[in-house]
Amino acid sequence: MAITPRLELRHSQSLVMTPQLQQAIKLLQFSNVELQEFVEEELAENPMLDRDESDLEPADGNGPGEVQNDIYGEEDFDAGDNASAPDNLDAIDLGRAEHVTEEKSGALDMEEYDNVWDTESGPTSGGEAFSDWGTSSGSGSFDPDAPDFQQNLSQDISLRDHLFNQIQLEIIDPAERMIAGYLTDMLDETGRLPTDLAEARVALDCTDEAIDAVLTKLQRFEPSGLYARNLAECWAIQLRELDRLDPAMAALLDNIDLLKNHDYPALCKVCQVDMEDMQDMVAELRALNHNPTEEFEHIEAQPIVPDVIMRPGVEGKWVVELNNDTLPKVLVNQAYYAEISKCVRTKDEKQYVTDKIQSANWLVKSLHQRATTILKVASEIVSQQEAFFRLGVEHLKPLILRDIAEEIEMHESTVSRVTSNKYIHTPRGIFELKYFFTSAIGSTDGGAALSAESVKHKIKTLIDAEEPAAILSDDKIVEILNEGGVDIARRTVAKYREALKIPSSIQRRREKKRAVGF
């Protein structure tokens, strides 16, 4: 058979992921924070986009700013969509959408520590005197006795600044200052040092004796308990400050593993004290500060901002609407586009303007589709889990992505993207949409299956109610659940108990005995 070149005509179908489609998928899985950041970048890069700062709504309440379920509602990102954005999508306000359901420290240079004191509050090098500190009030007042207005300002000081201020006052020798500064930068979030300080010795080229001498000074700093290498040393530092580190207490700290296991008879023997003295010693340890850095933790808890808000409606219905605060408002600046289109001269300029206007239109459409899809998925979840919202977690039913996808006629991957990092505010609290998808646990009597979350709730309720003299083992919990109609294995109970961070029956027995006395 001769091999010759020839032309063939073939007909085939394939799904092509256009850049616009990829962008739409990416927007769908963004959290509200990520979406805000992405839109801000687009506003900075695309001159055809503009921020919609208008809070005016259309007079009839159903203008282009209103998202309805029938607009792009049947489109699925996974099916592909190469259509261009419609011309009337100049401005989209995504905040008015609603839907009503029916039932529903590595090594540092020595020079770095030479210059660490070059601040407004201290000398510029380790050898300078401290006599001129605080002589200038900086308030602009001619009265030297007048208080500095900055002293009246409330300002949180970090742990590092607090410690470096003490180093400035307590340690004068430049070499010791460098060691102290390096050790301070090695502290972890609990104010402790690594067990092995070889890194500091190599980085600073000093001896163990020099490090130990500085460490002894540092361990006298406030708050007491810092610069320890483990919990026992942290307690020892605090007890030494209280003049309570006697031989018995030192022996107790040397055998802290026995204390963790609540082996009090062995501790009494090691410390050579009776049970009454041991109770007093343990009470002293409980009164100590286990984390000396707590008073310097000025971390403000960032509340979760829900993407969807659910509230009771009329006649027992649920109203599900998008949270306006999490949705960016952008519009296509058609006036600027019309103006700039008249000024283009070259082919490249024309292509640039065309690309930007198409990108702007597509972004507005993608934001609209994202909002509509989230609304559809959230509404269906509320409908499916209606019993949970009315009666509680025990009535949370098993649910998988396919159940929602089939109802709203979308692909499972789309539902998965929508429910990731998205939150809904309900009368029972704020939940991630993923929370409502749980595996099924069979019923012993052939009834309806239970969700894993409801079974976890049952396990937690049983353990919370147990008596110190009758701690429930995993086998006993299985027996009780089986009698209640839950078909569950012991290993599943153990897995759920560990997921709830509940200790074993042996550990719970020790803890509850300790709570009521030895």
Image (cartoon, rainbow, N blue to C red):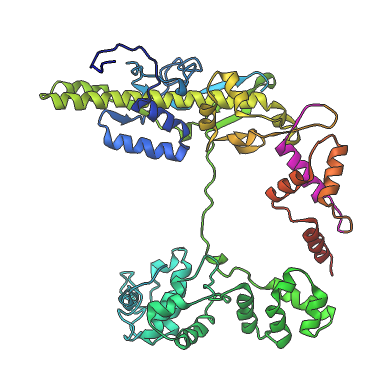
Please identify the quarter of the rendering in which residue 447 is found. Answer: top right
Where residue 455 appears, as percent x and y from the top left, is 75, 39
Position above or below: 166 against 72? below
**In this view of the protein, which residue sits in the foreground, 265 or 168?**
265
The mark tally for this picture is: 0
Q: Quick one: which residue is furthest to the left in this view?
A: 345
- Magenta stretch contains residue 456: yes
**In this view of the protein, which residue sits in the foreground, 185 or 59?**
185
Where residue 400 appears, as percent x and y from the top left, is 63, 29
Position above or below: 108 against 239? above
Residue for point 48% across, 69% down: 159
Using the rendered image of the protein, determine whether residue 205 is visible from the camera's viewpoint. yes
**Does residue 191 appear left or right of residue 442 in this picture?**
left
Q: Quadrant of the C terminus?
A: bottom right
Where residue 114 appears, as percent x and y from the top left, is 32, 78
Residue for point 69% across, 52% down: 501
Position above or below: 93 against 505? above
Please identify the quarter of the rendering in which residue 18 is found. Answer: top left
Q: Give the extent of the magenta segment.
A: 447-468
Residue for point 84% across, 52% down: 472
Where residue 349 appears, as percent x and y from the top left, is 15, 27
- Magenta stretch contains residue 509: no
Please identify the quarter of the rendering in which residue 453 is found. Answer: top right
Using the rendered image of the protein, determine whether residue 92 is visible from the camera's viewpoint. no
**In this view of the protein, which residue sits in the foreground, 387 or 315?**
387
Q: Quadrant of the N terminus?
A: top left
**Does residue 140 appear left or right of residue 147 in this picture?**
left
